[in-house]
Image (tube, rainbow, N blue to C red):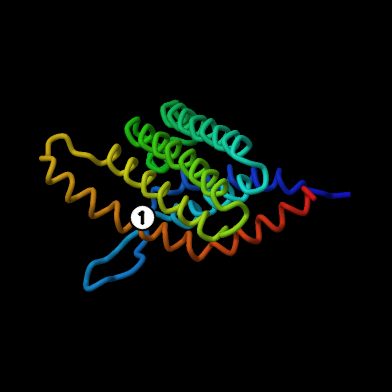
Amino acid sequence: MFKIQKFDFLVSFYILCIALSELMGAKTFPLINIFGYQLNASVAVLVLPFIYTVDDVITEIHGKSRANSIVWSGLIMVFFIMVFSLISTHLPPSARFQSTEAAYDSIFGLSARISAASLTAFALGEFLDVYIFSRLRQRFGKKYLWLRTNVSNFVSEFIDTAVFMTLAFYAFDKSPNNNLAFLTSIILPYWFIKCFMSIIETPLVYLGVHWLKKDNT
């Protein structure tokens, strides 16, 4: 009979969201216009909150150690995606593929700087999320799941966003004040979007915990 273990599904979904954000996150779309200022967001913002949701669900049911193991697995997948992207875009195309080579390289090509920024920010954000959620669970027990998940998400998503934007877009030919103004203008709006997504997806954490708990009772 066809059957999927719930934990296996969650881990697979977690890896899928990571792959989608890495492979398709370069595209931005207009999100909202505030007083004539157009706020754009990466399409990755649609899947990133799910990554943190899975972190919190697994930490709630299986604990910090198991969640960290999943994060390490995700980091290795990100590394493999980056390495394979670099290899595949540098291999010479066959004659039949030459006409689409430029488009392929444009879509899947990754600079070493962006790759390092993405990997570093992902690692810090994910491990911090698990750590904060675990500490809050020790403090409050099983109560206030909504508070524990959002506090851990808000803090870790800020670090993730700030680290990535700084490592990826800091201009060494500009003054520190100029860089600070520019980075603040892209970090804060993007972080606010992530926080909003985290809030509206809080019910998914409750559903995920209830759903996964059935396999552990």
From what the image shows, is residue 194 above or below residue 134? below
| Helix, strand or loop at mark 1 | helix
Looking at the image, which residue sits at the far bottom?
Answer: 35
Residue at the spot x=42%, y=59% of the render?
195
Q: Nearer the viewer, residue 169 or 27?
A: 169
Q: With 2 as the anchor, is 53 left or right in this view? A: left
Q: Position of residue 94 (x, y in %)?
A: 48, 29
Q: Position of residue 49 (x, y in %)?
A: 50, 54
Looking at the image, which residue sits at the far right?
Answer: 1
Q: Nearer the viewer, residue 142 or 50?
A: 142
Q: Position of residue 115 (x, y in %)?
A: 39, 34
From what the image shows, is residue 112 above or below residue 168? above
Q: Position of residue 143 (x, y in %)?
A: 60, 58
From what the image shows, is residue 142 above or below residue 138? below
**On the image, numbered disc 1 is attached to which residue?**
191
Dot 1 surroundings within 10 Å: few (below 14), some, or many (20 or more)? Answer: many
Looking at the image, which residue sits at the far front?
Answer: 139
Residue at the spot x=65%, y=61% of the render?
207
Total tally of numbered discs in the picture: 1
Residue at the spot x=48%, y=57% of the render?
150
- What's the residue type where badge 1 is placed? Trp
